[in-house]
Amino acid sequence: MPNTIIHLDMDAFYASVEQQDHPELRGRPVIVGGGRNRGVVAACSYEARPFGVRSAMPISRALRLCPEAVLRPVRMARYQQVSRQVFAIFARYTDRIEPLSVDEAFLDVAGCGRLFGTAVEIAKRIRREVRDELGLAVSAGVAPNKFLAKLASESAKPDGLLEIAPEKVDDFLLPLPVERIWGVGAKAAQQLHRYGCRTVADLRLLSEMQLKGMFGVWGENLYRLARGEDSRTVEVDQPSKSFGAEETFASDLRRLEDLRRELLGQAEKVAARLRRHGLEGRTLTVKVRFDDFETLTRRLTLPEPSANGMTLYRAGIELLQRTDAGTRPVRLLGLSVGGLEPAGQGQASLFPDAGSQRLAEIDRAVDKLSERFGSGRVRRGTLFEGEDEEK
Ligand SMILES: [Mg+2]
């Protein structure tokens, strides 16, 4: 399989934009963050990193480590503006673009070869154009799949390009620490360390059954990732073809139960909107932004298209659990539903079982109450009780 996936990730994006907009800051340590009593580093320039400054660190601590650093407030509107320019450069080469955040995306350039050359040649051109036109550095990873492409761009930073040729996957992957694998957080890493797994090579020694035993269904995923296999395709966002809700919190949410309550509200809102339009959705995406502005999305395909608040909520919880939410403060949470189609197309609706009929009845009741009292006022109190058993 040829290399067709490119992962692009801007280097120290917010800090680099500040340096670009304020030439006197170039070559100096820059810290972006603070404001509205959020005292953490949102981003720092590469000049600040040798001092030990990192994202998510309290600004007071960062300034103690690097007193000569220049502190700049977060200017999100400006970063979004630059982000649009960056994505416009990506779009010169393909329309198969999956944005992961303001400064990061996957591109699938299969079939672009005749026009623009190989994936590596395209990555080189994008890097040059972003540098020449915007004065910013973007690192690139080129690989046969998304998992490997992202690892490659991480290894290429700063301001680099790395290709993992299909026959070189093991050379690259086996020596990496398990923490580098997508989805292996601190907790999973600890568990793997207890089994003597420190590198991907160690992880290869565990069977699929063993990994399933340790991590449930996700263990199967881990088994494949350890072999460099990832079947996820580049998901092109079609903004008009999804319904979503998101919320930036006045103060960061730390407790999982608060996030779940928020997610339930969003699921109900999106589901009600789908029903108003006579639609059901097949894919569900949860977006989480942490206090250090790291933003990630998790997506799954539902077994059946749905416009049911509880179904969306349950799937959303599953996705939320694949993030560090609950251990790291969350400043933004969002839920959206895509893969929309007219309601009543799926099998479940043709042969409704008692359960789904009952869910539909509850939905109708919620809709009626919402009409009378305004949406957002109606909440299924019993859901909280049923869903809180984990604690
Ligand atoms: Mg970045």
Image: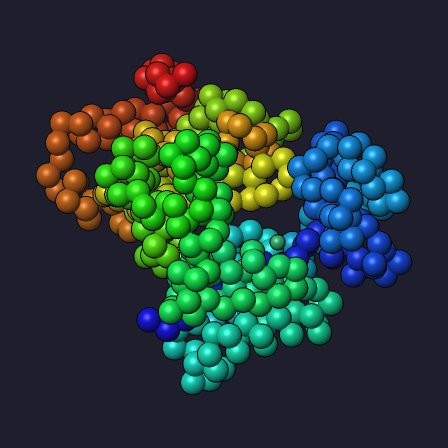
Say which residue appears at 78% left-offset and 53% top-offset. Answer: 47
The spot of residue 359 in percent (x, y) is: 24, 28
| Foreground residue among 146 and 132 | 146
Q: Quadrant of the N terminus?
A: bottom left
Say which residue appears at 64% left-offset and 39% top-offset. Answer: 292
Residue 60 visible, this orientation: yes
Residue 202 lies left or right of residue 210; in this view the side is right
Relative to 70, is 162 above or below? below
Relative to 99, is 255 above or below? above
Q: Residue furthest left?
A: 351
The spot of residue 193 in percent (x, y) is: 44, 35
Q: Quadrant of residue 268?
A: top left
Q: Quadrant of the C terminus?
A: top left
Residue 239 visible, this orientation: no
| Foreground residue among 347 and 5 | 5
Q: Quadrant of residue 89?
A: bottom right
The spot of residue 20 in percent (x, y) is: 78, 61
Relative to 28, is 331 above or below? above
The spot of residue 108 in percent (x, y) is: 43, 67
| Foreground residue among 299 and 378 | 299
Q: How is the image coloured?
A: rainbow
- Quarter for ligand 1? bottom right
Say which residue appears at 49% left-offset and 56% top-offset. Answer: 151
